[in-house]
Image (spheres, rainbow, N blue to C red):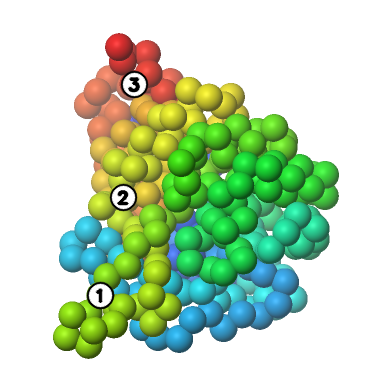
Amino acid sequence: MSDLRVRLAGIPLRNPFLLASGIWGESGTSLAGAYAAGAGGVITKSIGREPRMGYPNPTVEAFGQWGFLNAMGLPNPGIDAYPEEVATARKEGATVIGSVFAPDAPGFAELSGRMADLGVSGIELNLSCPHAEGLGSEVGQDPAAVEEITRAVVRAVKIPVIAKLTPNTADPAGLAEAAERGGAAAVSAINTLRAMTVDVRLRRPTLAHGLGGLSGSAIKPVGVACVWQMYERVKIPIVGVGGIMTAEDALEYVMAGAQAVEVGTAVAFRGIRVFGELVSGLGSLLQELGIDRLESVVGAAHRTAG
């Protein structure tokens, strides 16, 4: 049986499949459920300092068979309400990474410190949500801000810091370089692509907020390209995100340079059983290809390109 274990920036994972932030991860019970279903680790919903209601409905719209458009507005219960949720997931053995968002470096540092105190294994910085005013990609598309925020958080915590980066910029790999300069232990790429649709009968945007983010299979080639470019320019580990529906999708990201991957939209389509299916499928695929260890083919496509 091929070895699927991964050590992501010092965080041991039993397999490379992480539950992506924003899907299934608001409660400790749902985080634990994803881990029990086979995920290698779980990432919480992005948590802010105060409770946040998010945008009014409609906030999610299926985009055919390829994914979703969403503009949730980062709804969350706030950090004060979150200790019990992390404790519930950890009690069931889950490897938990805490996702946080804030408008500036001091805010990120404070929240990350409080999240770290809950016993999470790492921090993921949401620098990439495409539709929240003054947050997410509005902060994270500036390399100087990415570096400043990352450095502030690295100084505030003693666990690995992962910067989740936006594709909605001219140079995503430049953002990865900024995160690396700031001391990030890893980067994850990508978050959703800024997108929208219009209801021609109602003559208004489909989502109440108007602009949203596109996820799912439709964005996989963009995510793979970003991981490819980042692998060529940074030395820290990369987590691939975007459109991973099959074991082959995951291996594509790994060969482009990712050490681990996050799964989101596939969970929404197929439920948390998808983790067991992906783990089994990847093991079989590696055996078919004669690959003993997943880590041995990280970035393999770069070695054969030319």
Give the mark nearer the N terminus: 3 vs 1.
1
Where residue 25 appears, as percent x and y from the top left, is 51, 67
Q: In this view, does 52 lie above or below 144?
A: below
Label 1 crowd bin: few (<14), some (14–19), many (20+), radius 10 Å: few
**Residue that badge 2 annotates:** 219
Which type of secondary structure does the marked residue at label 1 adopt? strand
- The disc labelled 3 sits on which kind of residue? Ala
Q: What residue type is labelled 1?
A: Val
Estimate how packed mark 3 is, as few (under 14), some (14 to 19) or many (20 or more) residues with alpha carbons within 10 Å: some
Q: Which residue is drawn at 31% across and 45% down?
A: 220
Residue displayed at 66% across by 51% down = 123
Q: Residue at x 27, y 20 (%)?
A: 290
Instruction: Name which quarter of the figure residue 126 lies in.
Output: bottom right
Q: How far apart are marks 3 and 2 (CA)?
A: 20 Å
Residue 101 visible in the shown view: yes
Which residue, given by chain and number where applicable, does mark 1 sit on?
A: 198
Residue plotted at (31% across, 50% down): 219
Look at mark 3 in the image and give the residue it sits on: 301
How many numbered marks does the figure carry? 3
Q: Nearer the viewer, residue 14 or 243?
A: 243
* Front-most of residues 192 and 256: 192
Q: Name the spot of residue 166 as percent of width and height, x first.
A: 49, 49
Based on the displayed image, in which of its 4 quarters is residue 110 positioned? Answer: bottom right
Q: Which of marks 1 and 2 is nearer the N terminus?
A: 1
Determine whether, in the image, residue 268 is placed left or right of residue 10.
Answer: left
